[in-house]
Amino acid sequence: MSRNISERAFLGMSHSPLYGLNAVDAAVQQQLDAAVAQARALVQRFDPELVVLVGPDHYNGFFNELMPPFCIGSEATSVGDYLTPAGPLNVDAALALGLAEHLMEADFDIAVSRRMKVDHGFVQALQFLWGGLDTPPVLPIFINAVAQPGIARVRRCVQLGQAIGAFLDGLPQRTLVIGSGGLSHEPPVPTMEHHDAAVRERITCARTPTAQEVAAKTERVMAAGVALASGSSAMKPLNPQWDAQWMQASEQGDWSAFAAQGEAAIAQHAGLSAHESKSWVVARAALASPGAGETLHCEMRHYQAIPEFIAGYGILLMHNRAPLTRS
């Protein structure tokens, strides 16, 4: 493949903490494992020199005491929740701060964390693609997807992605931009409307949970997935139709129909945590800057509705040069 300073790929990829924990039908698991393996092979073929990773948090690193809509990490450490590895991410600190400077100059106010904590919302994608945290240099970008009212609107996510794309246009690195999150799902992530004051306090003030609290949370989320699959849950069911529409919009790079529906429609149709899907918007909008005249190739598109994982699980991989499936 020929090199180009703006050569990059986009990967939209769902995550689920229940992957590997809750049992699913063998055929379903085999199909999903095969899709993840295909994505990994395509990414390895692309061989990125830089990874821009956009992902959410589930009250492991960001809390309501101070919740930015977006935040760039110049350093990031995985908390190692569920089955993901703990430890530092391979963050390019100078480049992360350079991106922050670029965004500020572009009139896009951005928060910066010098010690970002991330959870499976970031790490599962790295784990699946590289086997752990030994990856190419990473620029981690947090997106708030759980704490209203500071969840960015679709149009603002597009603007952020375009600004990131303009920054990447000036870099020589071959870059993979990952949006980790979504699609339709409503796991038992508490909100500030919770009736229990202790729960509201837990998602407000940052602290490290005890081993017993981590175990109890894992069991609670696993049970929620089992209940959703059995039809005995009061949680919002998965919405494959919404997921298909979101994946199509992501492939086309046009979410205007979703923006026109209004912010509340996302949670109404796809669940409270479907806002994680906006990580795809940021990442996809960074694939090609406006007016660049790029020819985009969709390398793979995969979807499964897996209630045991509380996830409409999608994978979408696109590239702005010759298809990766060719020599």
Image (cartoon, rainbow, N blue to C red):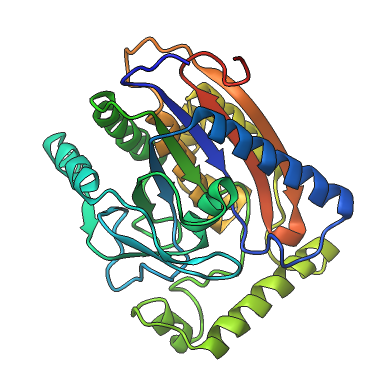
Left or right for 157, reference 12: left
Q: State how many labels appear.
A: 0
Which image quarter: residue 60? Answer: bottom left
Query: Which percent across, then down, holds residue 175?
Result: 39, 32
At horizontal 68% and vertical 41% (from top left) the residue drawn is: 37
Residue extending farthest left = 105
Taking 306 as reference, is 249 above or below it? above
The C terminus, quarter of image: top right
Residue 262 seen in render: no
Which image quarter: residue 82? Answer: bottom right
- Residue nearest the viewer, comparing 192 with 136: 136
At horizontal 47% and vertical 83% (from top left) the residue drawn is: 199
Query: Which percent across, then down, holds residue 41?
Result: 62, 35
Left or right for 92, reference 272: left
Query: Which percent across, then down, holds residue 169?
Result: 28, 24
Taking 40 as reference, is 229 above or below it? below
At horizontal 48% and vertical 42% (from top left) the residue drawn is: 179
Query: Which percent across, then down, holds residue 324?
Result: 57, 21
At horizontal 61% and vertical 67% (from top left) the residue drawn is: 83
Residue 270 seen in render: yes
Taking 86 as reference, is 315 above or below it? above
Left or right for 255, reference 299: left
- Residue nearest the viewer, comparing 183 with 16: 16
